[in-house]
Amino acid sequence: MAAPCEQVSRWSAPSGNVFGAGNVKKGIKIPPTSEFRRLLSLATPERWRLAASLGLLVVSSAVTMSVPFCIGKVIDIIYTELVNQGDKMKERLQQICSILVVIFIIGGLANFGRVYLMNLTGNNIVRRLRSQLFSSIMRQEIGFFDKNKTGELINRLSTDSSLVGSSVTTNISDGLRSVAQAVGGVSMMCYVSPKLAGIALCIVPPIVLMSRFYGRYVKNITKQVQDSLASATQVAEERISSIRTVRSFAQEKREVAAYDEKIDHILMLSYKEALARGIFWGSTGFSGNMIILSVFYSGGLMMTESQISVGDLSAFLLYAAYVGVSIGGMTTFYSEMMRGLGASSRLWYLMDRTPTIPVSGGVIPTSEVVGNLSFNNITFSYPARSDMQIFSDLSLLVPAGSVTAVVGASGSGKSTLGTLLLRFYDPTKGSVVLDQENIRDLDPMWLRTQIGSVSQEPVLFSCSVAENIAYGAQDPTKVTAEEVEEAAKKANAYHFIQTFPEGFNTMVGERGLMLSGGQRQRVAIARAILKDPKILLLDEATSALDAESEYLVQEALERVMVGRTVITIAHRLSTIMKADQIAVLDKGAIAEVGSYRQLMGLNNGMFRKLVERQTITS
Ligand SMILES: Nc1ncnc2c1ncn2[C@@H]1O[C@H](COP(=O)(O)OP(=O)(O)OP(=O)(O)O)[C@@H](O)[C@H]1O
C-alpha cells in the first residue's frame, strides 16, 4: 500500500507569522563560507557535467570568435580579386566557405551539448535544493510553523529554489561564455588593430562601474520581490484551501482585492526594477553605438591612409559587436547572480535552521511501554505568544490503562495538554514523564509512535480511504488490505466505505473534505487503531454529528480505548461519567481531580458548577 500524503490534526498548531527580518539570525548556524561561495558550492556535485559543459563552451566560443576573422578574410579575397580582376575568386571562396561550414557544424554541436548539459545540471541542483529544503522544513518544530506561513514556505520551495538553481548553472554558463567571448574579442581587436582597439575599449570602465550599481540594486529589489511574492502566495494558498469558508461568507471580491493588493506591491517593485533596467540598457546601448560610430569614423580615415584593409575593418567591427554583446551578457550574468544571492539568503536560513525540538534522536526504551503518565509542575506559553501563559505549575497523574477526561472552559488549555505530551512543544518549566522517563530524553519519533490521536476535526490526506487508514501504521507500505479492513470494521467505518462505488479506493478529496464529519472521524479512528498505540489522545467532536453518527463514533472510540492509557477531551456527559478520573482545568492548572461521583459530591466544586451550568463544552 502506497504511503499517503500528509495529515494535519487539531493537535497540530495553526500557521502564523512571516519570518521577519529580525528572525533571520535566530537558530541559525552561520555558514562558514561566504554567501557567494556557498551559492557556487551548490554546483560542486555536478562538477564533471559542468567540466564537460565548460569544455564545449570553449569549443563553441572559439568557433564564434573565428567567424569575424574568417569573414574578414572572405571580404579581403573578394575585394582583392575584384580589384585585380583575378579568376580564382570562385575557387578560393568555395574553399573558405566549406571550411566555415565545418566550423559552424562543430560550433552548433558544441553549443547543443553545452546547453543540454547545463540544463541537466541546473535541474539536478534545483531538485537537490528542493529536497534539502523540504527535509529541513519537515524537521522543524511545530512552533516554527506557528510563525512561518505555509504559502511562504511553498514559495521558497518552488520559486526561490529555481531562481537559485538557474543562477548557478545556466547563468554561470552564459556568463562564462560572455567572458570568454569578451576576452577573445578584445584580443582579436588588439591583434587586428591596436589603435582602433584603444578607441573602442574606452567604453569598458564606465560600463563596469554602472554594472556594479545596477547589480546591487537588482539584488536588493529581488529580495523584496521574493518576499512580497511569498506573502502573495500565502494569501492565495490560504484562501484557495479555505474556499468553502470564503464562498459561504460571500467574500470572493474582498479576497481578490486582498490578493490584488499584494501583487500590486510586486508590480510597484517591478516598475522600479524596469526603470533601472531601462536606464542601464539605454545608456549602455547608446555608449556602445557611439563607440561603434567612432570606430567607423577612425577606421574609415585609416582605410583612406591604407593603414587597414576593408576586410580587417569589417572583422574589427564584428569583434567590437561581439564584445558589446558579451559585455551585455556579463552584466546580465552579474545581475542574475545578485538575483540568485538575494533569493538564496532565505533558503540558507531555512536549510541551516536547527529545530528547537529534534524530530528524532534520544533514548528508545528497551522495555515494553506501561503507559503511566505524569505532568509535573508544568508552566507553559506558546512560543508565538510567549506573553500569554497557558499553564502555571500544572500537575496531573494519568495512571496506565485508565481513562482521564479533561474538562474545562473553552481556551483553558485542554488540547494544549495533548500537544505537550506529543512533544510538539516543550514546557517552559516542569516535565512530562512517561513510565519514569522525562519525554525530553526520549526519541520524539519513538514517543509519537506510542501515542495515537483522534482529533475533533481530523484532517485526511487527498488520497484513497485505504491509504489514509494505512497511514497509521509505522510502515504504511507493508499494511495489507485485510489489516485495513479489520481496522475499518473496529472503527465502524467498514459499512459506509462499502457503500462507495470504489470502496476502499475511494478518493477522499483535499483534507478529506469529500467525506462527512462523522465518516472522517471514523476513518481517523481506524487510522489510530492500525497504529495500535499504548496511549490515546481523544478530542471529542463538539460539532453536532447526527445521533446515528455520534453513536457509531462513540462506540468505535470505546472499543479503541480498551487496554490503553486514554486522555480524552470530553464534552459528552456519557464519556465523562465513564472516565476513571476527571481533571478540571482552570486558570492554567488542574483545579479538581476525581471520579464523577467524587467531584459531583463537592459542594461548590468547579466541576459540579460546570455540569449544573452545562458548560462542559469547548
Ligand atoms: N499554536 C498556538 N499558538 C499560540 N496560542 C495558542 C496556540 N494554540 C492554542 N493557543 C492558545 O492557547 C489557549 C489554549 O488553547 P487550547 O486549544 O489548548 O484550549 P482548549 O481548552 O482545548 O479549547 P477548546 O475547548 O475551545 O478547543 C487558547 O487561548 C489558544 O488561543
Image (spheres, rainbow, N blue to C red):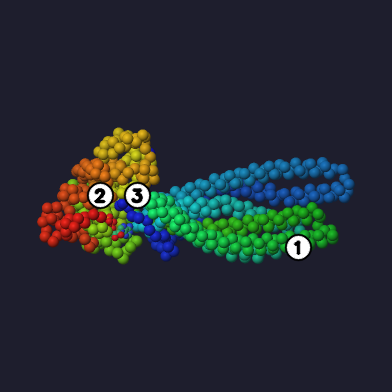
Q: Badge 2, how many Cα within 10 Å: few under 14, some, many 20+?
A: many
Residue 117 quadrant: top right
- x and y percentages locating residue 488 in the rendered image: 28, 38
Quarter of the image where the C terminus is located: bottom left
Asked if the residues shown at circle 3 and circle 1 are in contact, with their CB atoms under 8 angstroms apart, the answer is no
Whether residue 400 is visible: no
Q: Which one is earlier in the sequence, the residue at label 3 or at label 1?
A: 3
For the residues labelled 3 and 1, the Cα–Cα distance comes to 69 Å
Which of 43 and 478 lies nearest the eye of the viewer? 478
Rounded to the nearest whole Å, what is the CA distance between mark 3 and mark 2? 16 Å
Please name the amino acid that badge 3 sits on: Val
Q: Quadrant of ligand 1?
A: bottom left
Direction from residue 586 to residue 82 in the image, left or right: right
- Check disc 2 and report the residue beneath it: 540
- What secondary structure is marked by label 2? loop
Mark 3 or mark 2, which is nearer to you? 2
Look at label 1 and name its amino acid.
Ser
In the image, which disc is placed on residue 294?
1
Residue type at tag 2? Glu
Residue contact between numbered discs 2 and 1, judged by CB atoms under 8 Å: no
- Residue 421 is tagged as none
The reply to whether residue 572 is in sight is: yes
Please state the horizontal and vertical placement of residue 109, each as a whole percent of the image: 64, 42
Mark 3 lies on residue: 8
The quarter of the picture where residue 215 lies is bottom right
